Image: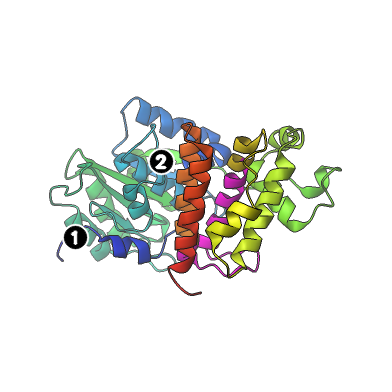
Amino acid sequence: MARKKKATQQEVETASLLVPLFTSSDLLTHQPVVHQIVENSFNAQRVNHAYLLTGSDNTQLLQIALLISQSLVCEKPSPLACGVCDTCVRVSKNLYTDGVILNSYPASIKKDEILQMQSDLANTALEMAAKKFAIVHHIEHSSLEASNALLKFIEEPQSSSLTIVLTTTDENSVLPTIRSRTQMIRCLPSVNLIQREDFDNIKDVDDLSWFAYEACAPTKLAMQRLLEKESFPASIETFKKILDLFKMSQPFMVSGQKQVFNLKDPNARVIVMDTFTIMNRFFKEVAAQRKPFPIKISPSQGLNGLVLTQLSQQNLTNNANLTLCVDYWLIEMERILKEESV
């Protein structure tokens, strides 16, 4: 089988996403211990040659495996992946030339698939990062022959530039020899840490407002702090106005300038930052084909909106001009919405 060539820009834009983009901040929020382990290894430049991520069915194992792989090759790591550069996006879409993602679940992974993966990674790295990765998701569904081939692959890595990331929801079914030759990282199940009824002053808010609160406050402590933030209601209203714009036929840029963002507010920068955080969650849901509200946006538009919003938020963090940043977001958002009919 021939080595895959570097994806074209058109392929990057049209490929289906494996999972919604999962950032370093997401990992810190949902898996703080895992975040510390992974961040420490990248800070010390001591990334293990093989990892085994374990957890329940409710754990974001594939997302974490992708984040580790993105962090190996990211164009602007700090120290984990930025999640928005061209390389990070291509990894999440399985379009990175020097990476292989094997996910046969619920079918059994066969020996031939492991051997093919080895063959695909045998040549010299072609990408600028000069690093390679292999992800094997749900290795508990491997045949015995495939497990033995995978063990040999781990024991005899083809180069020091290769990192192997395995995932399983049943570590006891994994060969003991594989467990002993990998750095095992146990991940906690994802849980909803807050409930609407826990907070008397917002338990009766509408669904859009609660969606916004959840996006910005995943824990009870964070929610208490958010409820003390006087500017946050303005972010909720801005979010609602953006959703209204998605339903309108007039130009997004013109409507956005006139109706959505009040940049004369003394807290405008904070309001915009929180609004982008809410939009990040909205676009992640859309990209994962879980539309939280009846808005006509496709998964690929959701992904592009997510990348755009994360980039805009990053620019604001780096003290970019607020007006220019918002105008750029509106212009690019209008372009994204026009890219395809939905």
Q: Which residue is mark 2?
A: 82
Which residue is at the front of the view, 91 or 249? 249
Where does the image place residue 281, in percent across and percent down from the top left?
A: 58, 51
Q: For residue 286: magenta?
A: yes
Name the residue rendered at 69%, 52% in the picture. Answer: 211
In the rendered image, residue 39, in percent from the top left (x then y), is placed at 42, 31
Which segment is the magenta one? Answer: 274-301
Q: Using the rendered image of the protein, determine whether residue 313 is visible from the camera's viewpoint.
A: yes
Q: Is residue 212 left or right of residue 130?
A: right
Q: Residue at x 66, y 62 (%)?
A: 244
Q: SS class of the residue under badge 1?
A: loop
Q: Horizontally, is 31 left or right of 14 in the view?
A: right
x and y, in percent, of residue 105 in the image:
42, 64
Q: Is residue 20 visible?
A: no
Indicate the quadrant where residue 69 lies.
top left
Q: Is residue 130 above or below residue 334?
A: above
Quadrant in the rendering for residue 29:
top right
Q: Which residue is mark 1?
A: 5
Residue at the limit of the structure toward the bottom, as seen here: 341
- Mark 1 surroundings: few (<14), some (14-19) or many (≥20) residues within 10 A: few
Q: What amino acid type is highlighted by mark number 2?
A: Cys
Vertical order, 181 against 303 (above or below): above
- Seen in the picture, residue 254 relative to 317 is either above or below; the reply is below
Which residue is rendered at x = 48% and y = 31% of the image? 319
